[in-house]
Amino acid sequence: MSTTTTTTTNTDIPTTASTTTTTKIEAKITKLNSIMNDQNIKLAKRKRAKKKLTALTCKNNSKVEKTPNTNNNSTSTKETKTSAAAVIKYVEEIPIPKSLILKLIDDYDPTGGPKRKFRLFSKYDQGILMDDESWYSVTPEKIAKHIAERCRCDFIIDGFGGAGGNSIQFARTCGHVLAVDLDPTKVQLAINNANVYRCVEKIDFINGNFMDVARSIQGITHVDVIFLSPPWGGPSYRDKSLTQLSDFTPDGFDIFRAALKITPNIVYYLPNNIDHLDLAKLTAMSRSYGGTDHCEVEENYINDFVKTITVYFGNTIRNFNPSNEE
């Protein structure tokens, strides 16, 4: 997690100020670390030190200073980074490899300004962790909250849980959540993030393939709702005029079919350029499995731009009336 600050420096003036600032930051980190590790100091004070340490490291982790270029009149950049040991210490109880923690620090907010991280997780600065993929795959918190309100039930499955953005919000509105993800790192990140939101006890995390999990619980466990947000193929989907369910891995139709064998109440989170003919096919598939013969499509806006759509089936449709399906 690093921010890059570029300052203009006169090439005739030595840049000792930057070095002094870096030294002071490292001294503060060392002091806060010693407070955190001193068991003779009151717990409240150690907790305050821990919070300051995290904020300090996130704010000052990366710094760019201008240095003279002796070959020409232009300036070159030299990157100096403070130690990431503090952040590693902060999350040492989470079983995530140190190499990944360092990468998370170095890749801090790569996709846009300081507000983006808080759009994804409002408690971002309280210990939230994400990997590269999560920056573009996590559902923004306001959208996740809205979907969770519409999915109120006793038991919900989040088939592609990722870093936990949706699962955390489902834990607010549902009795229990089963979060599934194939990537073990994503599961570890989701557990950490659920702990930040203090809802981890309402979520069961499974490191596995949703298709396998769906087959194993079919006809055994009652599930009220299934939420599907499979990988869309990375940010490159935005470059297409249309995204099709068959582009997904696993195939988006196969995912929906596996969910229908468990419950007709499905919520599908999809890109805004999804082929609407595919939505018609999903509706026909729903009907063939005894579900609704129609769906509800909801557009999700951020800054007046349609970011994604959410498609509701079964009793997740507003004003759902089972008699209309007979």
Image: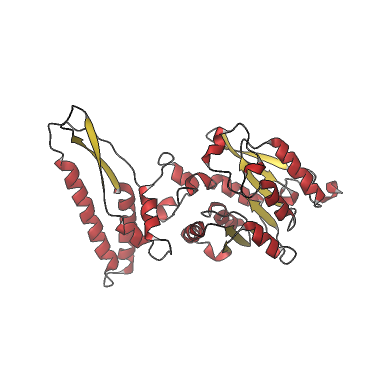
Residue 228 lies, in percent from the top left, at 64, 51
Which quarter of the figure has residue 102?
A: bottom left
Identify whether 245 is placed above or below 50.
Answer: above
Whether residue 72 sits left or right of residue 61 in the image: it is: left
Rendering coords of residue 169 (x, y %): 57, 54
Choose top left, top right, bottom left or bottom right for residue 300. Answer: top right
Instruction: Specify the farthest residue to the top.
Output: 73
Nearest the viewer among 276 and 29 is 276
In the rendered image, the residue lying farthest to the bottom is 40
Tell me, yes or no, if residue 321 can be seen here.
no
Please name the colour scheme applied to the rendered image.
Answer: secondary structure
**Residue placed at 16% from the left, 39% from the top?**
15
What residue appears at the point 58 percent right and 61 percent down from the top-left corner? 208
The answer, for residue 253, to whether it is visible in the render is: yes
Q: Residue at x 61, y 58 (%)?
A: 209
The answer to whether 59 is drawn above or below residue 72 in the figure is below
Counting the numbered discs, the total is 0
Q: Position of residue 110 (x, y in %)?
A: 41, 42
Q: Position of residue 213 (x, y in %)?
A: 65, 61
Among all residues in the image, which is located at the extreme front?
71
